[in-house]
Amino acid sequence: MSAQFDESTDERLIQSTLAGDDEAFAELVRRHKRKIFGIAARFARNDAELSDICQEVFVKAYQKLKSFRGDAPFEHWVSRIAVHSCYDFLRATRHDRENVSLDGIEIGVQPDMSARHASELLHWAMARLSADERLVITLLELEERSVRETAELTGWSEANVKVRAFRARQALKKILEASHER
Amino acid sequence: MNDDQLKKLFQAAREVKPDTARAEYGFETRLLARLRADHEPATPWHAVVWKLMPMFAAIVLALGVWTAIEPGASSSDLQSALTGDRDDKTLVSYLTGETQ
């Protein structure tokens, strides 16, 4: 199905989509979905949530495609939409996430801790952060993006990103210390 | 907890790459189906009314059947009304001495 678009650039696919060719948009999605799923997977708790977030991202991209000016690659543009959608998702589901139990998660930071356990503990602790704290920690520490990239993706100033990141790390430490004392 | 411990925690968490293959499967198909559904114009009111026609016809038919198989109640009401009227006339004739 996508063979006809193999050689097309993103710009050409965007033009075709705007001209009413939905298959061209499907090709754009096919090209960039891995990146968007990668971002959303840091926030979703299961496949259904992941799929919902990614659908929101690409539906918004489809609806706003006319406003894409092409001064940055399409992937950057759609990544920004993804980050905003994830932020909205975090704000909408904060209370659900706070109820995640610590049962079955190894408490405290041990030197020989497996990556899986560390990830579970971190996710449990991050679920207790506010939406902006969680977003900034995810982008800076888990996605390893620079302060500038994080600022571009979130729309916050670089100074704001640094302040939020500092506060988020402090909050995370407090949560992890409290879990260790339990 | 110090910064080094937190960094180690982040490092370990980074090593766990989320598996998105299952959610990605068939994603474009689902997305296009949703976009096409969003494109479809809303159903106009007269189309809704036309779709409800069989239901309206069934209600009218049911009312017709019901009035046909329940004649007793309505005719007895009519009969009593007529009889009551005749009794009144008989009483008036008796009292006034007029013949009908």
Image (cartoon, coloured by chain):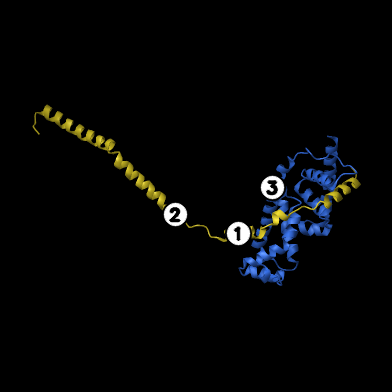
Chain colours: A blue, B yellow
- Few, some or many residues within 10 Å of mark 1 (<14, 14–19, 20+): few
Label 3 to label 1: alpha-carbon separation? 26 Å
Q: Which residue is mark 1?
A: B33
Which structural element holds mark 3? helix
- Few, some or many residues within 10 Å of mark 2 (<14, 14–19, 20+): few
Quarter of the image with the N terminus of chain A in it: bottom right
Give the amino acid type for the residue marked by disc 3 in the picture: Ala
Q: Position of residue A128 (x, y in %)?
A: 77, 43
Q: Nearer the viewer, residue A82 or A71?
A: A82
- Few, some or many residues within 10 Å of mark 3 (<14, 14–19, 20+): few
Quarter of the image with the C terminus of chain A in it: top right
Q: Chain of mark 1?
A: B
Q: Which residue is mark 3?
A: A92
Which structural element holds mark 1? helix
Q: Can residue A161 be seen here?
A: no
Residue A180 located left or right of residue B98: right
Q: Chain of mark 3?
A: A
Q: Position of residue A142 (x, y in %)?
A: 82, 52
Label 2 to label 1: alpha-carbon separation? 24 Å
**Residue at the spot x=67%, y=67% of the render?**
A2
- First-in-chain label (2 vs 1): 1
Specify the quadrant of the image occupied by residue B27.
Answer: bottom right
**Residue mark closest to the camera, 3 vs 1:** 1
Residue A122, compared with residue B77, is above or below; it is below
Q: Which residue is mark 2?
A: B51
Q: Position of residue A52 (x, y in %)?
A: 67, 53
For the image, the number of numbered tags is 3
Specify the quadrant of the image occupied by residue B78.
Answer: top left
Give the amino acid type for the residue marked by disc 2 in the picture: Lys
Label 3 to label 2: alpha-carbon separation? 38 Å
Q: Position of residue A28 (x, y in %)?
A: 69, 65
